[in-house]
Image: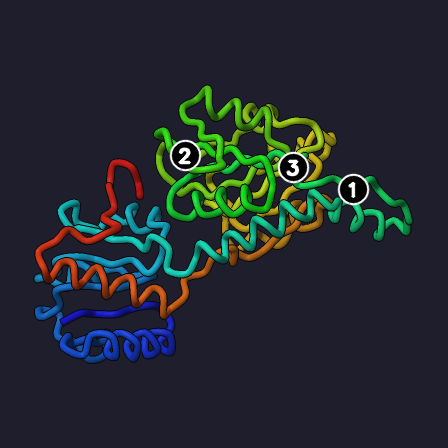
Amino acid sequence: MILVHTPNPKEVAAYLELFRAAMPEQRFGSLADIQPDTVRYLIAWGIPDGLIASLPKLEALFALGAGVDKLLSRPDLPESLPVYRLLDGGMAAQMIEYIRYGVLGYQRNMDIYRRQQAAGQWRMLAPKPPEDVHVGILGLGEIGAAVAKALAHDGYMVSGWSRNPKHIHGVHSLHGESGLEKLLETSQVVACVLPSTPQTQGLLNGERLSLMPAGSMLINAGRGDLLDQDALLALLDNGHLRCAQLDVFAEEPLPAGHPLWRHPAVAITPHIAAITLRQEAVEQIVGKLQQLARGVEADGLVQRQQGY
């Protein structure tokens, strides 16, 4: 038996229909119609307390998302339980669109024009071609690498940073502390797609943000705990950073009175940069289940010590 669960019953029903059509030889069910001692696999997002402990024969957990930081922090998650995450699930294309939108807006000065509009100003600015804009991507996993390649194809100068060296055509790959500093110092737009891990939490603190060139832009579509929001505000207020596009925050939803809401240089979106698409997620998880059935290690096994 394979249990499918999300907090939204309608979403569960939609997933069950897709999974049953894709694997008619398997039994898929919801919390309402399963026997706990028959469940071998759990496919879930937003797991209620006590659920994992109630499944004595659980062999693996499949997350309906790429980020698993909140899942790994659960005290009821057995250390021996394999956890598999989505490597894409339709999210790479969305992330490319989201970051491309921010970079193009910076290149064409749209953030400045919005502020001029609010002030009733009519002032044309000199155009800048994409090859004159240096973009730095923090995180070169499945999604980050796709973003870097897409922006390089668009004609931007692209650098990328990761824990370990990567080789991506058209992208200057950097790693380590010195590589991070170099990327920040040379990128007019820094786009973060890193997961939340013990190594990345607080990565973009005031000292590192200050390394960015004057008049540069930050895009954060990774996780909110990577960024020191107060330090960002200070650098926006003193004019060192020109603008920011933020999709993730230390606390979500972002509290109503937070100064980021009303800052003229900040564009906010409600954690929508890359949302799991059902059909793509189902196809990927079905592939993992088929791999396990053949006795092959499935793609996307989370390495606990790395956090992804």
Which residue is identified by label 3? 131
Residue 42 locus on image (x, y percent):
21, 63
Tell me the quadrant of the picture where the N terminus can be found.
Answer: bottom left
**Mark 2 belongs to which amino acid?**
Thr
SS type, badge 1: loop
256 to the left or right of 149? right
Q: Position of residue 104 (x, y in %)?
A: 66, 48
Q: Nearer the viewer, residue 80 or 169?
A: 169
Residue on which the image places disc 2: 200
Whether label 3 touches label 2, CB < 8 Å: no
In this figure, which residue is indicated by the disc labeled 1?
Answer: 127
Q: Quadrant of residue 49?
A: bottom left
3D distance between C-alphas at marks 1 and 2: 35 Å
Q: Earlier in the sequence, mark 1 or mark 2?
A: 1
Query: Relative to 148, does residue 17 appear above or below in the rendering?
Result: below
Q: Amino acid at mark 3?
A: Glu
Q: Residue at x 80, y 48 (%)?
A: 113
Split into 4 quadrants, where in the image is the C terminus? top left
Q: Secondary structure at mark 2?
A: loop
| Foreground label between 1 and 2 | 1
Give the residue drawn at x 70%, y 43%: 107
Counting other residues with Cα less than 10 Å from the Cα at mark 1, is it few (<14), some (14-19), or many (20 or more)?
A: few
- So how many labels did they put on this image? 3
Query: Left or right: where does residue 285 sit relative to residue 145?
Result: left
Residue 275: image location, x then y, percent: 45, 60
- In the picture, the disc for residue 276 is none
